[in-house]
Image (cartoon, rainbow, N blue to C red):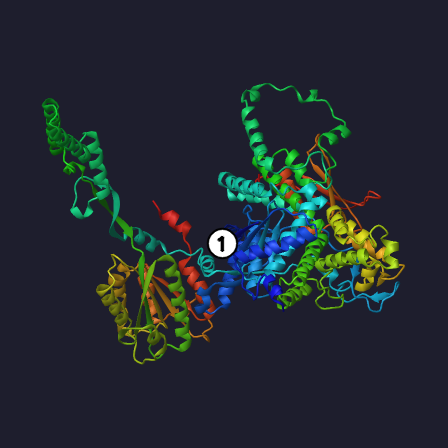
Amino acid sequence: MYIIDRRLNPGGKSLANRQRFLRRAKAQIQRAVRQTAGDRDITDLERGGEITIPADGVREPSFRRSGEGGVNDHILPGNKRFVEGDTINRPPGGGGGGSAGGDNGEGEDDFRFALTRDEFLDLFLDDLELPDLAKRRVATVETQGFRRAGYTVTGSPVNLALLRSMRNALSRRIAMRRPKPEELLRLEEEIDRLEKQEGSSEQLTALRQELEQLKLRTKRFPYIDPLDLRYRRFEPVSRPVAQAVMFCLMDVSGSMTEHMKDLAKRFYMLLYIFLTRRYKHVEIVFIRHTHEAKEVDEETFFNSPETGGTVVSSALREMQRIVEERYSPDSWNIYAAQASDGDNSPNDGSTSAALLRDVILPVCQYYAYLEVGSDSDRMQTGFINHKTSLWQTYETLQEQGANLAMRKVNHRREIYPVFRELFRRRDAEAGARVP
Amino acid sequence: MSLLEHDNLLFQGADWDFSLIQRIHDAVEKIGVGEMGLNVYPNQIEVITAEQMLDAYASIGMPLFYKHWSFGKRFALHEASYRQGFMGLAYEIVINSNPCISYIMEENSATMQTLVIAHAAFGHNHFFKNNYLFQEWTDADGILDYLEFAKGYITRCEERYGHAAVERVLDAAHALMSHGVHRYPRKKRPNLRSEERREKERHLHLEQTFNDLWRTVPTKGAASKPQLSDERRRALLELPQENLLYFLEKSAPRLQPWQREILRIVRQIAQYFYPQRQTKVMNEGCATYCHYRIMTRLHETGQITDGAFLEFLQSHTNVTRQPEYDDPHYGGINPYALGFGMMQDIERICTKPTAEDREWFPEIAGSGNTMAVLRDVWANYRDESFISQYLSPHLMRQWRMFHLVDDPDQPELRIEAIHDERGYRRLRRSLSRHYDVGWSDPDIQVIDVDLAGDRRLILHHHVLNRTLLHKDDAQRVLQMVANLWGYAVVLKEVEPATGAIFQEHVAHPHETLF
């Protein structure tokens, strides 16, 4: 008898099967994920969790009997009052006698199972892509780094490749037949012995001569030679930047209701999740503004009330300052999302436009403007009946060719479609643009 | 409690370690082999975690298996219901192999490990080694090597021909799995060890005899081919054939060699599991009876404490519980309960027969040698024959069985037979038919191929009891058959007595698939 402890065997033996299953049912799972995401609170979005897909898509059919027609026999235990020949009224629903008739696997339910957080987000964000602009920039925006690249014969002592150098020295010593210390020692002992014995002087002289020669050879071929030395070589490489900063700009003046802030928050959360999937390291900067802008922490950003007028350019200026101070565009991917109800002080329009066009947009990978409306404001999405002053400003910019995305959102349920629309994979367009 | 008894104890409390497992195994072996005369494969006991148990569930309990999405689906399903607490895990899984592998869960208590070892490593093990169906159809020595080969082969196919292509073949093969077994012994016994070698040989032969020149040799006109008689043609194709996978593997004209090999792999595995489906009641009955006897003996000889024995009894009665038909928990007849009940009944007949038993079972009543009778039963029967032979009036009365007939032509359900003198034989016959695979699986056969015409494959479903195939599923599976066959396939549902056709399904192959 053998006892084998398998507990330490690597788990996840079914992982490959699971991936095959997810791939198989991808379309359905994706639909389910979208649906779940719609119902869920955005803060829960990252958690993964249970989804339900129709069993039909992952059905494994086989030749089996339909369970209809023909005579059904049941042998049941627990007879209490029946005698042979009794008749029973058919139970409603045609369940036969007891539950025995119904378990033919006829009514397959929906298929419920749990996705991990990673699987969930992968599917959730699957066909989203950072927009073209960002892609182009990501390719060029790089940092310099070094990478090992073989050995060189020159270099600084810190880069000395000891092992390699010693190996070279050893092979050189062998090749040149440099005498080994033991050999010299043996010879010396031999001479000593002969001297003591006062043996034949001829032999002694020969030995002394040999020793002399070997010593000369030892001197001529040093133990280690500059020729042997090797240094580790490093090659400069450029690495794409894998960090991003996300600027959240929001108007917090009195006209922004809680509802609007909630919409904005949801959008920021989505953007954050999305960015964390694409970049190793994502930082967030919250800038809120009334007639003046301030960098704040998240709590203050969303919750503390503020009053005042609305000057958008103040926020843009604050962002410009922070970028210059902390986030050099050379090493950071910069994303910005601005949420506002669209108010702006009348004389600020041109300032904002100029600031955005000349300073902000050039350093940004992506700038999204989200105009939040009130819930009661039941306009169809996408149609702006009366354009707000900020919308007008940005629209002119966009017409001039600035890369700026803008959408209007009134209701919570529109957030997700709008987000998807903004980051939709634009394969076709991108392909067309590549020369 | 005397000092001697105390010395005898295998364990106290719930903790166990590997040396204890060894001692438990030896003690169980002493009773199982020494007193009960069980004949078992050498045991290999593997301790696994709950997650590994879920893994094993997904691949039908086998320690290694090829990859397919349906196993992932099964895993997701089990995992979801396990995590939500709808489903407990089995205490063990046992594999019909030599050495016999039993998986035991790490969280079992020492008592449960004893139970599991008695149940799986001796009960099931004895059954696997001695039952004629397993002897005939499975190769316990070769199965693990064969699975290893199958896994490797399918992985290589995936690398070479792509996941999608392999998946399509596997999907189709799985759909036909229940119709991929030989039901009657053939000339040779299967030897799974040689399968891998034979696959290589087939491959080599093809490569060696490949000569491109043959392509250039002008062929004679098709007219010179002798016209085969219908009889001869069917004989050459081994028709009618009820093993659909076998037929497709051997005769489908457009399959690649690797696709045939995949069909073969699935067919071999289906054949390996075929006996298990036919011996559910007996297999569990045998294992349950063994663990009950062994645990009782361990308790009698003072090797386990009263507490441990009570713990055992609690889970034993859970397993062998049979709710009555009007109980909300009723979910059909519990194979553990029926099997264990019948084994105990045989013991009773052997040792304390009544006049009725002597009349019904003259050969075994009062023979006194329970184990000899049981060993013979375990070796030579399957569920269907076992029940029709050994279900006693006493047990039918005890269970208060009755036979209910649901005839769609009648307005009411009728009680056909109950546990009385008039009903015993009829009850027994109907119950045994429930366990007849030939009765519960639809009988589908390849009848003919229209070789001269459009190569249409003709299948017949011999309709039993006026029950047609599940229409949607039948159409889907037929589509897969058509894809494998490469030409149109028609499935006729035929009443065997009159030859009347109830329904006809037709499927045409998707040209793009293969």
Which residue shows up at 26% across the image and 47% down it?
A: A147
For this view, does A235 lie left or right of residue B193? left
Report in which chain the residue with disc 1 lies. Answer: A
Viewer can see residue B393: yes
Which residue shows up at 52% across the image and 56% down it?
A: B18
The residue pinned by badge 1 equals A12
User: Element type at marker 1?
Assistant: loop
Looking at the picture, tell me which residue is in the foreground, A423 or B120. Answer: B120
Q: Quadrant of the C terminus of chain A?
A: top left
Please, what is the three-letter code of the amino acid marked with disc 1? Gly
Which residue shows up at 68% across the image and 63% down it?
A: B300
Residue A265 placement (x, y as % from top left)? 39, 70
For this view, does A382 lie left or right of residue B285? left
Looking at the picture, tell me which residue is in the foreground, A407 or B501. Answer: B501
Q: Is residue A291 above or below residue A47?
A: below
Q: Quadrant of residue A97?
A: bottom right
